Image (cartoon, rainbow, N blue to C red):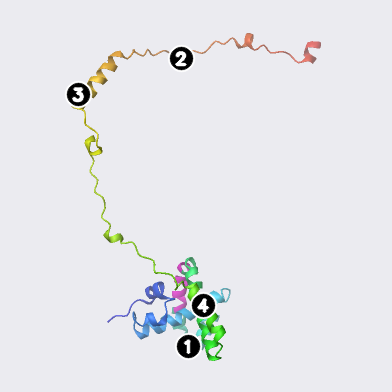
């Protein structure tokens, strides 16, 4: 069986919980996905550092070759635009991780108060106290069929008998009553502006 393309897996499930991943993918795919997730977190935490430092960081952590880590980096660079547009999902996932880590640390110390606060915050943040939203059954909605018609009876209006002939008769009637329009040529208006609006010279010119 061929393995799924890792870039497609990352686009869909980069922040999916590991328990859910086990139901969807093989161990090899999950291992690489978890590695790319850690690498992605490092990249967004160190956006100004060069690629070489990224490679050195993860060859040291994983023991893999430069080539393998550069391949991961290429995938991350393809994912970044899409992931940045859905950064809210990432921060939601990150907040859940922090709450779960806080709960586990408090549990080790048997700090029940902190455990209770972390569990309460986790439940509130993920709205587990609310009923699941009902999904609209869009696939069961039947599209209303529409058919064009000139029959007004579909609206409850009694149709007029011989409507086409009556329309023709009315057009003929009003056409005969219409006064012929006479076309005239454009003429410049003679407003006698000089007499209507005489130009009064300024006071200085009158004195001269």
Q: Is residue 17 above or below residue 172?
A: below
- Who comes first in sequence, dot 4 or dot 3? 4
Disc 2 element: loop
At x 53%, y 80%, the residue is 118
- Which of labels 4 and 2 is toward the front? 4
* Gap in angstroms between the C-alphas marked 2 and 1: 91 Å
- Which of labels 4 and 3 is toward the front? 4
- Which of labels 4 and 1 is toward the front? 4
- Which of labels 3 and 1 is toward the front? 3
At x 28%, y 61%, the residue is 139
The residue singled out by tag 1 in the image is 62
Number of residues whose C-alpha sits closer than 10 Å to that of mark 3, classed few (under 14), some (14–19) or many (20 or more): few
Q: Which residues are magenta?
A: 72-82
* Gap in angstroms between the C-alphas marked 3 and 1: 89 Å
- Who comes first in sequence, dot 4 or dot 1? 1
Tag 3 near tag 2, CB within 8 Å: no
Viewport quadrant of the N terminus: bottom left
């Amino acid at each position: 069986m061929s393995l799924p393309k890792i870039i497609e897996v990352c686009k869909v499930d980069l922040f999916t919980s590991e328990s859910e991943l086990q139901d969807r993918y093989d161990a090899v795919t999950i291992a690489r996905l978890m590695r790319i997730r850690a690498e992605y977190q490092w990249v967004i935490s160190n956006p100004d550092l060069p690629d070489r430092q990224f490679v050195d960081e993860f060859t040291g952590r994983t023991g893999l070759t430069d080539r393998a880590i550069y391949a991961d980096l290429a995938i991350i660079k393809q994912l970044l635009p899409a992931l940045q547009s859905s950064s809210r999902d990432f921060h939601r996932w990150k907040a859940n991780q922090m709450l779960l880590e806080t709960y586990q640390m408090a549990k080790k110390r048997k700090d029940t108060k902190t455990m209770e606060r972390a569990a309460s915050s986790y439940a509130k943040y993920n709205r587990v106290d609310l009923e699941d939203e009902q999904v609209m059954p869009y696939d069961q909605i039947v599209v209303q069929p529409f058919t064009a018609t000139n029959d007004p009876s579909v609206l409850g209006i009694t149709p007029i008998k011989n409507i086409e002939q009556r329309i023709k008769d009315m057009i003929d009637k009003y056409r005969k009553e219409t006064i012929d329009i006479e076309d005239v040529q454009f003429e410049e208006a003679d407003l006698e502006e000089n007499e209507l609006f005489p130009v009064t010279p300024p006071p200085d010119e009158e004195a001269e």
